[in-house]
Image (spheres, helix red, strand yellow):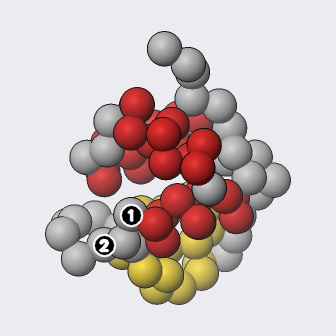
């Protein structure tokens, strides 16, 4: 099984839009996205490479598993 690696924040934004999240606001250097089914917002830093632990925490919030994430991100 391939590992999750860090990605550029713009690619992660494309992923979030693909799964149905909408941009809400920017607070400092963090972007805030919201999905209608979730109780918590998706928050990630606007940096060149988003750390793996941030991606994994957001995937847990989105209820998306490892394999599905890799399939979607490879097609973007």
Instruction: Name the spot of residue 70 as percent of width and height, x first.
Output: 51, 37
> Does the rendering let one see residue 50?
yes
Seen from this angle, which residue lies furthest bottom? 25
> Residue 60 falls in which quadrant of the image?
top left
Q: Secondary structure at mark 2?
A: loop
Q: For mark 2, does the 10 Å Cα neighbourhood hold few (<14), some (14 to 19), or many (20 or more) residues?
A: some
Which sits earlier in the primary sequence, circle 1 or circle 2? 1
Instruction: Name the spot of residue 30 as percent of width and height, x first.
Output: 61, 68
Where 73 sits versus 26, above or below?
A: above
Of 37 and 30, nearer the camera is 37
Q: Which residue is mark 1?
A: 19
Seen from this angle, which residue lies furthest top? 1
Q: Which residue is mark 2?
A: 35
Of 70 and 23, nearer the camera is 70
Residue in the picture at 22% in, 66% down: 38
Q: Is residue 1 left or right of residue 9?
A: left
Residue in the picture at 40% in, 31% down: 66
> Residue 26 falls in which quadrant of the image?
bottom right
How far apart in space, not on screen, are marks 1 and 2 (Cα)? 9 Å
């Amino acid at each position: 099984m391939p590992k999750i690696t860090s990605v550029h924040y713009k690619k992660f934004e494309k992923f979030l839009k693909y799964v149905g999240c909408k941009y809400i606001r920017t607070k400092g250097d963090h972007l805030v996205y919201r999905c209608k089914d979730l109780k918590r917002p998706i928050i990630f830093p606007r940096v060149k490479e988003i750390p793996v632990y941030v991606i994994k925490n957001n995937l847990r919030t989105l209820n998306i598993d490892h394999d599905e994430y890799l399939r979607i991100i490879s097609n973007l």
